[in-house]
Amino acid sequence: MSFVRFFAEGYIEQVEISRKNRDWTFYLVKDELLPQNIYRSFSKMIQDKFSHLAKVRFIWRFEKAEPAALVAEYWSLFIDWLQREAVTVNGWMSKAKYDVQGNQLTVVLLDQIGLELAKKKNVDLFVRNFFSTTFKRILT
């Protein structure tokens, strides 16, 4: 797969390397959103290529992307990440809906039980953490 057209106007802003932990973090900047399927393919390809050297992580900043578009494109990536990071969520968040107004993201759950579980599991902190560490975007 050729990624050139998706990255033509993008650049690497910074790279952090931890020799001790064998971690490489690439800070990438791009004007427009990267389609999620390209994001996943690119990330997997680079991570696989360098897996013998280090664990590779990407932090993206999409300069012109509106928060609503970012969340719409990457909500399912967040759900996948949440199911790995908070195993006890057990997929019930995948049924949640969301609404974005400006930088405010509201998660809409199906019932009161879901709301109580989300509060108990601190889902709001997971949402903030994911979007701020993966995309340098603060959502409240």
Image (cartoon, rainbow, N blue to C red):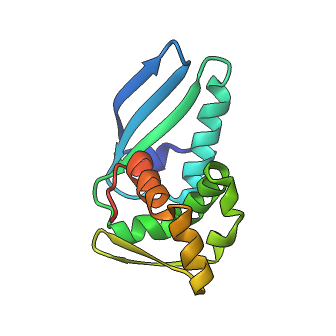
Q: Is residue 37 visible?
A: no
Q: How far from the left and from the top, in percent, is residue 128?
A: 41, 57
Quarter of the picture holding the C terminus: bottom left
Which residue is at the far bottom?
Answer: 111
In the image, taking residue 86 as reference, residue 17 lies left or right, namely: left
In the image, taking residue 31 as reference, residue 42 lies left or right, namely: right
- In the rendered image, which quarter is residue 16 located in? top left
Q: How far from the left and from the top, in percent, is residue 92?
A: 67, 71
Residue shown at the point (59%, 21%) measured from the top left: 54
Q: How far from the left and from the top, in percent, is residue 125?
A: 44, 57
Count of labels in the image:
0
Pick the front one: 73 or 137 = 137
Which residue is at the far right?
Answer: 90
Residue shown at the point (38%, 51%) measured from the top left: 132
Q: Is residue 129 visible?
A: yes
Residue shown at the point (51%, 69%) measured from the top left: 119
- In the rendered image, which quarter is residue 99 located in? bottom left
Pick the front one: 58 or 41 = 58
Pick the front one: 35 or 88 = 88
Q: How far from the left and from the top, in percent, is residue 60?
A: 40, 46
Residue shown at the point (54%, 78%) measured from the top left: 115
Quarter of the picture holding the N terminus: top right
- Compared to residue 94, the image places residue 24 above or below, namely above
